[in-house]
Image: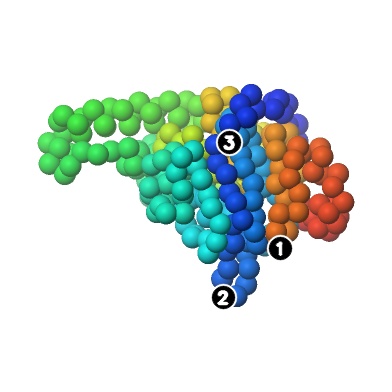
C-alpha cells in the first residue's frame, strides 16, 4: 500500500492533552501501569503495541468510558477524571471504536445528525414547534453535517442505511460521525483494521486532511506502515506499561519495541 507523505512535526509545542501515571485494574489484573504521555496540538500521535497491551483501555480512560484508579488526565484546563463521557465529548474530544458503533437501520445522514445532539440546547417545546433556538440549532447541525459529508467523501452514502454498507464504508461513516461533533481531539481506535489497501489509503488521506484542518489525532493502529506514514509521535505499550515514546523512526529502532512487538510478529 502506498501511504501519503507524512507531514512535518506539528508547528505548535502546546500540550493539548497530558496523562500522568495512569493506573487501571480489573479484578486485580493491571491493564495500565503508571502510563504517562502527552499529545501536542495539531499532531498525530500513534499508540502501538501487542494485543492486550492496554491501548484501547487508555482511549477509554481519556474518553470517560473507564475511570482509572490513579493518575491524572488533563485536556487543556480540564481534569477529565472528574467528568462523564458526554461531558468530555462536549469539551471537544470524540472517538471511534474498533467495530463501527452506528445505528444500522439509519442512513449515514441520520447517524451524523444524531451525533450532533451534544451541540443542542433547545427544550422540548422549541423542538416540537421548530422555532427560535431549535430552528437555529437544526440549521447549524445540517450545515456541519454537509461539510463533514464533503470532507469524508461519503456523498453517495448519505441516504443509504448502514446495514447495507460494506465494512469499509461503515468505517468512513464512523469517522464522519466523530467529526460532526466538532472535536479538537479525535481518538481513532484501529481505523484500518479489516480494510483492503485501497480503503486504507482513503482513510489515511482522510486522517491527514483532518490534521490539516487543525485537529489533533490520537491513533491506535497495528499497521506499522500506516503508523510510519501518518505519525509525528509514537507511544508503545506492552503489558500495560509504556516502554518507548518518540518519533516513529526512533521508536521502531528501540530494542525493547522490537523484542516486545515487532520481533514477535504482532503486526
Mark 3 neighbour density, 10 Å: few (under 14) some (14–19) many (20 or more): some
Q: Earlier in the sequence, mark 1 or mark 3?
A: 3
Q: Earlier in the sequence, mark 1 or mark 2?
A: 2
Q: Position of residue 212 (x, y in %)?
A: 58, 24
Residue 15: numbered disc: 3
Q: Residue at x 58, y 31 (%)?
A: 14
Tell me the SS state at disc 1.
Answer: loop
CA separation, marks 1 and 2?
16 Å
Q: Secondary structure at mark 3?
A: strand
Instruction: Identify the residue shown where x is 54% and y is 53%.
Output: 72
Reading the image, the residue beneath label 1 is 239
Quarter holding residue 211: top right
- Which residue lies at the image location 73% right of the left edge and 34% below the top edge? 229
Mark-to-mark CA distance, 2 and 3: 33 Å
Q: Position of residue 178 (x, y in %)?
A: 47, 40
The mark closer to the camera, 2 or 3, is 3
Is 106 or 120 nearer to us in this picture? Answer: 120
Q: Residue at x 76, y 54 (%)?
A: 243
Q: Which mark is residue 27?
A: 2
Q: CA distance from mark 1 to mark 3?
A: 26 Å
Mark 1 Cα shell of 10 Å, populated few (<14), some (14-19), many (≥20):
some
Tags 1 and 2 touching, CB below 8 Å: no
Amino acid at each position: 500500500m502506498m501511504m501519503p507523505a507524512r507531514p512535518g512535526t506539528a508547528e505548535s509545542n502546546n500540550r493539548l492533552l497530558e496523562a500522568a501515571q495512569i493506573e487501571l485494574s480489573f479484578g486485580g489484573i493491571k491493564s495500565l501501569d503508571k502510563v504517562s504521555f502527552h499529545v501536542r496540538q495539531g499532531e498525530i500521535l500513534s499508540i502501538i503495541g501487542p494485543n492486550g497491551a492496554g491501548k484501547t483501555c487508555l482511549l477509554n480512560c481519556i474518553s470517560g468510558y473507564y475511570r482509572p484508579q490513579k493518575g491524572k488526565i488533563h485536556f487543556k484546563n480540564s481534569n477529565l477524571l472528574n467528568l462523564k463521557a458526554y461531558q468530555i465529548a462536549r469539551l471537544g474530544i470524540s472517538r471511534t471504536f474498533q467495530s463501527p458503533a452506528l445505528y444500522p437501520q439509519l442512513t449515514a445522514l441520520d447517524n451524523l445528525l444524531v451525533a450532533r445532539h451534544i451541540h443542542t440546547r433547545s427544550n422540548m417545546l422549541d423542538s416540537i414547534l421548530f422555532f427560535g433556538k431549535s430552528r437555529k440549532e437544526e440549521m447549524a447541525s445540517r450545515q456541519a453535517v454537509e461539510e463533514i459529508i464533503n470532507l469524508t467523501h461519503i456523498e453517495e452514502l448519505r441516504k443509504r442505511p448502514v446495514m447495507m454498507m460494506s465494512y469499509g464504508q461503515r468505517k468512513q461513516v464512523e469517522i464522519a460521525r466523530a467529526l460532526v461533533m466538532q472535536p479538537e481531539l479525535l481518538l481513532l481506535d484501529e481505523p484500518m483494521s479489516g480494510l483492503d489497501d485501497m480503503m486504507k489509503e482513503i482513510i489515511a488521506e482522510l486522517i491527514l486532511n483532518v490534521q490539516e484542518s487543525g485537529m489533533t489525532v490520537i491513533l491506535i493502529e497495528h499497521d506499522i506502515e500506516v503508523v510510519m506514514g501518518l505519525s509525528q509521535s509514537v507511544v508503545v505499550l506492552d503489558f500495560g506499561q509504556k516502554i518507548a515514546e518518540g518519533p516513529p523512526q526512533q521508536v521502531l529502532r528501540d530494542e525493547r519495541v522490537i523484542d516486545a512487538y515487532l520481533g514477535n510478529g504482532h503486526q
